[in-house]
Amino acid sequence: MSEHTHHHHDDHDHDHDHGHHPEPPSDVEARALALESLLREKGLISGEEIDRIVSAYEHDIGPMIGARVVARAWTDADYRQRLLADPAAAVAELHPSGPSATNLAVVANTPEVHNLVVCTLCSCYPWAVLGLPPSWYKSPPYRSRAVSEPREVLKEFGLELPSSVRVNVWDSSSDLRYMVLPERPAGTEGWSEEELVALVTRDSMIGVARPQAPAGARS
Amino acid sequence: MIDREVADSLPRKNGELVFEAPWEGRAFGMAVVTHAKGVYQWGDFRDRLVERVSEGSTHYYRDWLNALEAVLLARGAIEPDELEARVKEYKELRRDPVF
């Protein structure tokens, strides 16, 4: 196991680089800036109030990036190859304005292999694609048991794997953060990328769940 | 803070809210905070939002921001002239960003 630098999660602060915009904001950005600055001046809102609302949802920025990456990999074999070979570049292809996903590694589930991600020492997590880690991911029981008894842990998450499926556990570090590329659910043939995105859950990209096609999915 | 009626208007995928850029989160937050302070009735905002979305627009938060501007202008919380002047200042980089 490689050394974990205890980098913890001061790295999920989003860089805004504000105050020295090299380029003018887009029209819609300018309108949002104008509206917020006026509402602040009038005392109708404070920046902190908006900050609180936004940060309450901030973690939701993340999982959608991962979900889009997965759905694209399901529908485009070339993209899938690029994603496995150079994850950071493949993520940037779909989300050029997002946080850089350097140190990301993508491990693909197959009918024979199921992948599970953990950080045994702390809570290293591919936040650029998945947002902030759920609290259980940071808990000591998950961090130890995901390694010592992964099948039991998966069962507790409601995922019972046949004994023929091998479970690979990947220990993340700040130098290498893993994300699971789950298998595309059966019965989703012909689905659009947008429809597929909606099936990809955060938990399926950590490896504690599998994306499920809704019952009665059209095939 | 976000009641049922408000929650139903929010875009959800995976059952979770989605912002793709900082301004989207700011637009969302401004609507929630000004509503919570009683600056406007949620229904007035929602009707405008539904109208814009149903016109077949392609960007949910652009419509959101547009509907919020409209409802705040209608309530007299801001004036059209000052808004357009402020937008111009930002476009011309004559004012420091607030987010």
Image: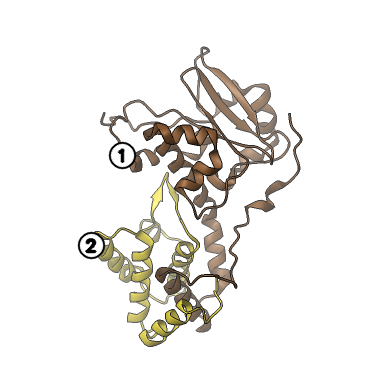
Chain colours: A brown, B yellow
Q: Which residue is mark 1?
A: A192
Chain letter belonging to callout 1: A
Q: Which residue is mark 2?
A: B55
Q: Nearer the viewer, residue B47 or B96?
A: B96
Please tell me the numbered disc located at residue A211. Answer: none
- Categorize mark 1 by other alpha carbons within 10 Å: few (<14), some (14-19), many (20+): few
In terms of image quadrants, where is residue B7? bottom left
Q: Is residue A78 left or right of residue A108?
A: left
A131 is higher (above) or lower (below) than A181: below
In terms of image quadrants, where is residue A166? top right
Q: Are marks 2 and 1 in contact (CB under 8 Å)?
A: no
Q: Position of residue A144 (x, y in %)?
A: 70, 29
Residue projecting furthest to the left:
B55
Instruction: Kindly state the secondary structure of the residue where label 1 is placed.
Output: loop
Q: Nearer the viewer, residue A154 or B39?
A: A154
**In percent of the image, x 67 and y 38: which residue is there?**
A139
> Mark 1: which amino acid?
Ser
Asked if one can make out residue B78 in the rendered structure from this viewpoint, the answer is no
**In percent of the image, x 61 and y 44: which residue is there?**
A102
